[in-house]
Structure formats: C-alpha cells, structure tokens
C-alpha cells in the first residue's frame, strides 16, 4: 500500500530565509508525487508534481521540490520565504498504475515570521 | 470556467439527522474524489466515482455513508443518522482522467458540524 510521511507537524522560518518541508513516501511501483497548499478555510491548491524526468521540479509561487529515489523523499523548498507562504502543506503520492487515488500526508503547518 | 463547486460551505446537523453534501466537478472532468479532513489527521480518502459508477470506496465507512455521481447533476455524499464524530471538513476533488499524471482540483469544502 502506498503511504506518505510528513515528519514535521510545524515548521517555523524567518522571512527571507530558505524553507524546507519534508516528505517521504512508500509505494511498490513508480511514484507520482504532488505538493498542495491549504490556506485557512479553503480547499487545497496544487503547487507542483513529479511524474518523470528531472528530479528538481519547479512549481507555483517560487516553490520547488527534489525527487530523491534512493531516499524515497520529495522535500518542498523555497529559497526565500514570505510571510504569505504561511499555510498548511500536504504531500501526496499516487502509485504508477490504474485508478489508485491520491494518498496524502498529515500536513505540515508552515509559519513564516516577519 | 468555474472550479470545483461544493455546497453548502457550512452545514449544521443535529445528531440523528441526515447530511447531504454536493459537489459539481470542473467542466470537462468526469472523475470525482471525496476526502475527509479531521483536525491533526490530514486528508483521508473516502470514495472515487465516475459518472454512474463507484470505482473505489475503500475509504468509506461501512455504515451510514453513501456516495453517488449520477449521469446528470452533482456528486452527492450522503451521511445518514449523523453522530458527533462525523464533524469534519469534507472536500471534493475532480480530475479529467484516471491517468496517474493527473493531479486533482479541489473544491473549498463543506464543513459539517454535528450538534
């Protein structure tokens, strides 16, 4: 069965500093990996995805993520954090076959402090 | 081009009543997914539907919960005889196909409160 782990419930970073939100996954086949962001009282918004190709994926709002197959990780990064990046971030995985739905991690709350 | 529309945004029900949550997918999307979000638990998959078919209901509780996606109209998540533990945010997502490369587009959710 596929699963996602986000080991940090909360990440605090100062504005202007780089940020990393961690994600590791487990699938039996090829992974298809996604990051979503959720602002208060809103639905999830797509940030980026890894399907194949370059391990470094660039997405919306200056975010990027690096796929590392040997470490089964897909950490979300941004070189310089903004206060407006403060939100709940979800990593998700689909296994590379059939109709399997997206499986989400528990989420990591990012707080960017001015 | 409206996104995924969910209504109502907020729903209050007394214990024992029925809750009906509606989801209209994005135009051109024929795949609908329902997720439940509980505090500190993240998003839990409930059910995956295509028009008139339930594809995967492995995340649905065995009793009181049902879902449909008729040929015409929105997808409906129905909770009968609600209990306090059903209080949560319920999100619907849609995608244009079943290929694994498709991400989902989410609605803003329905927040169910059982009193």
Image (cartoon, grey):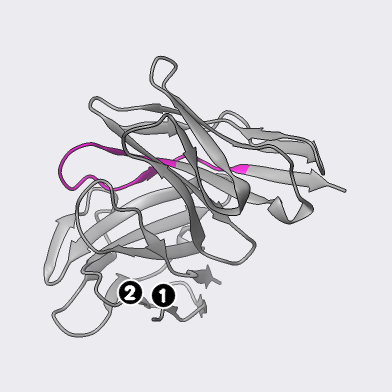
Residue drawn at 39 percent across, 73 percent down: B4
Instruction: Choose between A47 and B21: the one closer to the eye.
Output: A47
Compute the Cα span from label 1 to label 2.
Answer: 5 Å
Q: Is residue A41 above or below residue B20?
A: above
- Residue at the disc numbered 1: B3
> Residue A26's x, y, as percent?
35, 26
Query: Residue A50 placed where, x, y %?
Result: 38, 39
Q: Quadrant of residue A79?
A: top right
- Along the line of sight, the residue nearer the viewer: A104 or B26: B26
Query: Is B8 placed left or right of A61 in the picture?
Result: left
Residue A23 among magenta residues: no
User: Dot 2, crowdedness within 10 Å: few (<14), some or many (≥20)?
Assistant: many
Locate residue A97 relative to residue B74 in the image: left or right: left
The first of marks 1 and 2 along the sequence is 1
Q: Residue at x 31, y 35 (%)?
A: A52
Query: Can residue B87 be seen in this snapshot?
Result: no
Q: Secondary structure at mark 2?
A: loop
Can residue A11 be spotted in the picture? yes
Q: Is residue B57 above or below residue A72?
A: below
Tag 1 and tag 2, C-beta contact below 8 Å: yes
Q: Which residues are magenta?
A: A92-108
């Amino acid at each position: 069965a596929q699963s996602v782990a986000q080991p940090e419930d909360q990440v605090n970073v100062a504005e202007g500093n780089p940020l990393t939100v961690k994600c590791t996954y487990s699938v039996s086949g090829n992974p298809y990996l996604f990051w979503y962001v959720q602002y208060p009282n809103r639905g999830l918004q797509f940030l980026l995805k890894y399907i194949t190709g370059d391990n470094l994926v660039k997405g919306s709002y200056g975010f990027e993520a690096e796929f590392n197959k040997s470490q089964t990780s897909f950490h979300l990064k941004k070189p310089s954090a903004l206060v407006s990046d403060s939100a709940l971030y979800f990593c998700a995985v689909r296994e590379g076959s059939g109709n399997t739905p997206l499986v989400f991690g528990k989420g990591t709350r990012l707080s960017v402090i001015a | 081009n409206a996104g995924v529309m969910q209504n109502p945004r907020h729903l209050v029900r007394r214990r024992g009543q029925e809750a009906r949550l509606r989801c209209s997918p994005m135009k051109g999307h024929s795949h609908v997914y329902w997720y439940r979000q509980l505090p500190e638990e993240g998003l839990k998959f409930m059910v995956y539907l295509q028009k008139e078919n339930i594809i995967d209901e492995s995340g649905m509780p065995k009793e009181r919960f049902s879902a449909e996606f008729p040929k015409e109209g929105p997808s409906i998540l129905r909770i009968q005889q609600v209990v306090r533990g059903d209080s949560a945010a319920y999100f619907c997502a849609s995608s244009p196909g079943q290929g694994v490369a498709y991400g989902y587009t989410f609605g803003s959710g329905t927040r169910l409160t059982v009193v």
